Image (cartoon, helix red, strand yellow):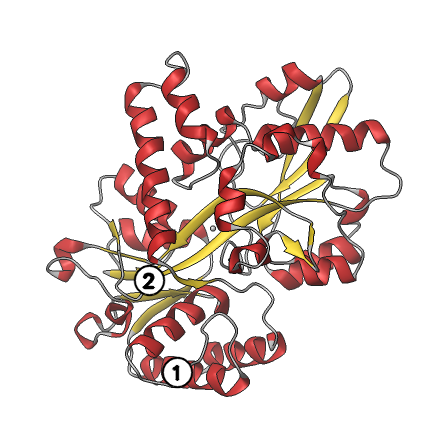
Amino acid sequence: MRQSIGSAAALPLIGQLSSRAFAATKGTVQFADIGVGDPGGDWSKYTAASGWGVNLVAFGNAPSAILNVLIAGGGQGTYDIINIVGGMQKPLVENSLIDEIDTSKMPNWAKDSFVQKYLTQGTPGFDFIGYDKKIYGVPTVIQGDSFAYLPEATGGELTSYGALFDPKFKGYVALEDNYTTAGQKTALYMKAAKLATIEDPHDMTPGEIKAVVDFLIEKKKEGQFRVIWNSFEQSVGLLVNKEVYVMDCWEPMVFVANSKGVKAVYAKPSEGYLLWAMAAYIVKNPNRTQEQTAAAYALLDFMLGGWYGAKITSLRGYMTNPQAVSYAKANTGEFSADEAAKVEAITKGVEAKLAQGGTWQNRWPKNVETYESEWARFKAA
């Protein structure tokens, strides 16, 4: 999970996403994904149940890039579903780019208690799937982000975003090139530390945004940041090569670093987490057949199911849906005891993050133009 789930660059996809995963007898659903919705290339259960295949295509996640692809790049006639970090409903709806979701067409929707608990109307989470009291996105992932660190280099546990700005790590810190992640986490820290008057890090005023960027520019000029990263592979490399000791990033990057033998830890900050949810949208296409639309809904329902949820949680480290844990435990031929335990632990971990709170990521803030211009000022400094 952010502008590219954080950056303006497309997240490299895991698996063979550009080719058709399984031959279909009825047709193929064109599924655009930012990199974490691929269940290891295995769509066989969906294909067996529906008769449709899935063509998984790499898709960027920066808000402006998404609009450009759908409006000017022919995306409306290309994709059936786009699976991105949610919160993009306002510009997508206002430009008539996505369909309202008919939840009655997805049996698994009613089974997803996470929607009612975290994403229901009237909560900050609703902004990731809804707009104007209507549902436009199907939540596929819910997560809370913080930052990573190498305990052997930092000398122990880090429990505050202040570590990103601590002079003793000068030159060994990296931030993501994204005002909705690095910017919001900085605002969360500055509010808690009383370094600036910030009413709500979720949706800042122009003056508050300027204060955050002024602070970041000051730190940048002091040499605090080794690099401002903008791709998944780059950030993983920074950890694996131990070029940085503290890094604003996503939790899957820690999993990859650990798999490569590097002891990296994802922090539990006292200030709370950057909370967010991915959403799968049905792209508005008046030329799509009823059969193709039905296949798209069937795919969305499949993604709300136990097997897909358990697979994504196991592979990516994100909480998905309430059926994931029970499915992994019950189906020992598909998930080992260790994998089932991992799915349960990750799910409980994300629920703990949501319970602690923090700030919900804002993909389309009220003063989005100011955010963009101020972030450009930070990058240029």
Q: Position of residue 285 (x, y in %)?
A: 83, 44
Residue 260 versus residue 341: which sits nearer the camera? 341
User: In the image, residue 301 lies at what x, y percent?
Assistant: 63, 30
Residue found at x 15% / y 61%: 154
Query: Left or right: 297 with respect to 196?
Result: right
Numbered label attached to residue 272: 2
Where, quadrant-wise, is the C terminus in this rendering?
A: bottom left
Indicate whether 310 appears above or below 162: above
Left-right relation of 319 to 290: left
Instruction: Please say if 23 is above or below 342.
Output: above
Kindly give the residue lying farthest to the right in the view shown: 287
Please report whichever mark, 1 or 2, sits nearer to the chain's N-terminal start: 1
Residue ID at (71%, 60%)? 132
Name the residue tied to disc 1: 217
Q: Position of residue 224 (x, y in %)?
A: 28, 75
> Which of the pair 338/56 is nearer the observer?
338
Q: Position of residue 277 (x, y in %)?
A: 51, 50
Q: Residues within 10 Å of mark 1 (few under 14, many from 20)?
A: some
> Which amino acid, mark 1?
Ile
SS under mark 2: loop
Give the spatial CA distance, label 1 vs label 2. 24 Å
Residue 72 horizontal side relative to residue 111, left or right: right
Q: Is residue 29 visible?
A: no
Q: Secondary structure at mark 1?
A: helix
Q: Identify residue type, mark 2.
A: Gly
Q: Nearer the viewer, residue 274 or 348?
A: 348
Q: Which residue occupies 51% across, 78% down? A: 204
